[in-house]
Amino acid sequence: MTMTIAILLTVITAATPLVIAAIGELVTERSGVINLGVEGMMIVGAVCAFAAAQMSGSPYVGALAGVVAGAGYSLLFGFLTLTLVANQVATGLALTILGLGISAMIGENFVGAPGIKMQPIAIPGLSQIPFLGPLLFRQDLFFYLSMALIIGVNWFLFKSRSGLKLRAIGDNHASAHALGIHVLRTRYLAVLFGGACCGLAGAQLSLVYTPQWVENMSAGRGWIALALVVFASWRPWRLLAGGYLFGAVTIGQMHAQALGLGIPSQLLSAMPYVATIVVLIAISHNRRTTLINTPASLGKPFVPER
Amino acid sequence: MRIELEKRPQVSKLFSYLSPLLALGLTIFFGAIMFALLGKDPVEALYSFFVEPLLEVWSLHELLIKAAPLILIAIGLSVCYQSNNWNIGAEGQFTIGAITGSILPVMFHEWHSVAVLPLMLVMGMIGGALYAGIPALLKTRFNTNEILTSLMLVYIAQLFLDWMVRGPWRDPNGHNFPVTVSFSREAVLPEVLASGRAHWEIIFALVAALLVWLMRRYTLKGFEIAVLGQSERAGRFAGFSSKRMVWFSMLFSGALAGLAGISEASGSIGNLQPSLSPGYGFTAIIVAFLGRLNPLGIVAAGLVLALTYLGGEGAQLAIGVSDKVTRVFQGLLLFFVLSCDTLIHYKLRIVWAKARALGGGPAQ
Amino acid sequence: MKKLALALAASAATLFSFAVSAEAADKTKVCFIYVGSKTDGGWTQAHELGRQQLEKELGDKIEAPFLESVPEGPDAERAIERMARSGCALIFTTSFGFMDPTIKVAEKFPDVKFEHATGFKTAANVGTYNSRFYEGRYIIGQIAAKMSKTGTAGYIASFPIPEVVMGINAFEQGAKSVNKDFKMKVIWVNTWFDAGKEADAAKALIDQGVDILTQHTDTTGPMQVAQERGIKAFGQASDMISAGPTAQLTAIEDTWGAYYIKRVNALLAGTWKAEQSWDGLKDGILTMAPYTNMPDDVKAMAEDTQRKIESGELHPFTGPINKQDGSVWLKEGEVSEDATLLGMNFYIEGVDDKLPQ
């Protein structure tokens, strides 16, 4: 395996959980709901996935458990913000704090347990292609799902009727409601989808990235995922690019150190965050493109008028 | 069956007072269940959590020490959130304020004068304000979302502190550990009472709470904040500029966060080190919401949250629960407060499907 | 009515806790403060295991409560004071960042004794304790040089504090004693505990051509990567063989139990004195995990080195050693002073990295 492929594989592993969590949040935000609880949902997904894999012996059961856990946890968020119309920013933060606490409690019994890693699946034929083969077609389920999600969500949002309705809600929930679109029901589904994706991303952390359970193992990736959504102007393909850019910077700074480039490690560690800010400025700069892509009702509570 | 919300014609005064108490009650109730599930005596557990920390003078001092930065930062955040500016970066402003406030004691530690401490505090406030100015600038000039910019800046601030304390500002006599020189006596925030460790930061917090309360109640600025927070358009008709409010609210909250930062470094620790803050900037966000963005509520909320920290520690020793319980408690409290708050603005109605179909309504 | 019930319940609880504490008053209290979670699989868990050993050994005479996840900074002082107030006779504060808080509380409670791990400030009632991890690092440096085919090791380092720099230098010394041209690549991950980051660092190092890994961070992330990629690695703070059954050569295990038992016995006998203790392999404060996955001659060499260090015949930092800039640090036969090591902020010759100054 050449060094380039090896490094790219590492980048893929690092970028995949970001992409999965972010695409879920993208759908949620496109429907007009901002869920800052991504970190909490990811860590809950990670611990449940690990626990389920330990108890069943199968990482696939674990992945499923992660998805269910993430979705279930997001239901709490949905109930508070959609039915009880609570403040979305605060509720999301509460989700994160509670999630970190609960996951630590659940995980206590699993610290030090040997991890069960999900093995890569080689796609027959395609995986023989030189260079691209081992890179793209000999990967684990999470990578394939991340790609499928990007393609699927892009199609859903921009090529399907339901997606159009969802985007309409995100832009102007009052008008959407007047047109007879189920605002709350769609938003619930969007929140659940977001939760499921975050749970799946968390599962990747404890089943592929570092197959073990460690407290707080999400290590702030949920917040990066949130940044990615904005970075991508709420467009799936840009999100993919952003996720990989971020993964590349994270891995790149390690290599820079190993090569002895002599740059202070704190500066290198700060690179991903600085990069995010720079890109945020670049894309928000043009007011028109921002307005076209930002869901205008983002964060605003909706109560159907009778 | 469906839960429906009916907007109250007026904000319910009753529930404004009842809601936080109801939330606290629910938290205690579910907390008791959680303890029982963990195999601990719920009464004893709740007692060590909520009552025991209040029984000793020493402990009360610690309560004030813990609550002070939370209240101080949250007061600033309340102004931001009320005006719809979501400053999530208080932790970063806290850190930068601590750094700028420490310039005098670290770089000029030979200068002994009464003026050192006040200057430190002012410089801390300026540092915090300037750092909060970055997301403000990005929002007003480039339209970038302040939640994300302020959050990213938190990580950058922490890495900067780490670099400063390991590099240029490292104490030459500190065996190369990442700590600055200890602040000289004039540079340490003094204690308020001799009976314990509580220092002036709690006074700052209470003064800030009072000032903001007065501002909201009696000044045009306060009115401006409320109006712009509710509706930018309405504000514009009244001649208020939402752009200037972005600057005002962000700089104000940054200054308070910076003041908290230097007060912590000076009063609680006595030097600068990477572990300056156990997440005060983020916990303060919770305090702001628990206090429902009201200065008096924030003081109460800060004390309650500090109580959970102290109680959690005491409970570890008294009944052997793990520290994770504290976080779960805090998360539960926030959840219940947010849920119960709905009752202030809305009436809850449970609607049965059959009745709805008869009543007719917009095609669903 | 409800208030009355609540008040009754509260008073019952108070009486109950009094009863419990009265019972326990006969036993001496020896207390522990942890910076991390007792199940962190690393630094704190090792101290917790030591505490459990202490309880098992002397449980009839002492009780050993603890506080975990106490952040360094302002909370630490409160936590330590809480323990002092709750009747602890001896308090172990197990992280460097607890140093100033320990001193401050010790001033207020002159009758309580304190021991601070890895610190350097003492007082009449405050001692410090540390473990000569560098002895272990020297041994693994030797093993690394013998086992590596590319002659380059990867070092995943946390923060550039003296402890870590000492470790890197000791590793390099050990490696050089076998192979004069042994190289090292260092990545600073700026965390003690982040499995993902450590794993990324491990992958980066391996991709850059190292074929042996060592770490000064606490999770099994790097070991797992090593196991997967088929290269050898060394465990840290605990035996990581379960994460790396064919990868781990040995590990430096923090085994504080023997030390804690020793000090508590001194306390009970009335002979406890504040001192700056720095025990090593021969005192059992650190233990090398069984040497495995290596050929017998390497194992024999490691065991021989260990024996020499334990008997005092060999000190890892014995001259001639030059600093990285070429200047002379130790002359031929000269052994390093403890004080220099405790404040180490320079690399020795051969380490290919720049220390943040």
Image (tube, helix red, strand yellow):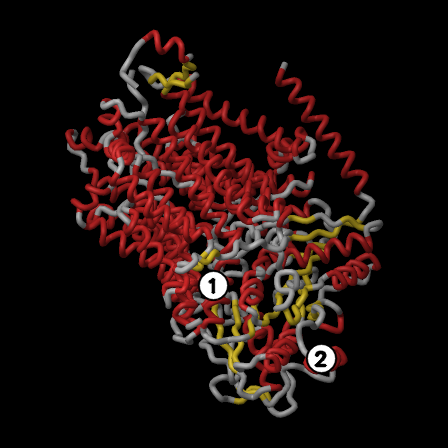
Return the chain for callout 1. Answer: C
Residue at 23 percent across and 22 percent down: it is A178
Disc 2 on helix, strand or loop?
Answer: helix
Q: Is residue A145 left or right of residue C350?
A: left
Q: Please, what secondary structure does the residue beneath circle 1 have?
A: helix
Is residue B194 depicted above or below C100 in this figure?
A: above
Number of numbered discs = 2
Q: Position of residue B178 (x, y in %)?
A: 50, 65
Q: For residue B208, say whether it is visible.
A: no
Quadrant where the image shows the C terminus of chain C: bottom left
In which quarter of the view is residue A127 placed? bottom left
> Which amino acid is tagged 1?
Asp
The answer to which of B71 and B275 lies nearer the viewer is B275
Residue labelled with disc 2: C296
Residue on which the image places disc 1: C200
Measuring from the top left, give residue C143's x and y in whole percent: 63, 78
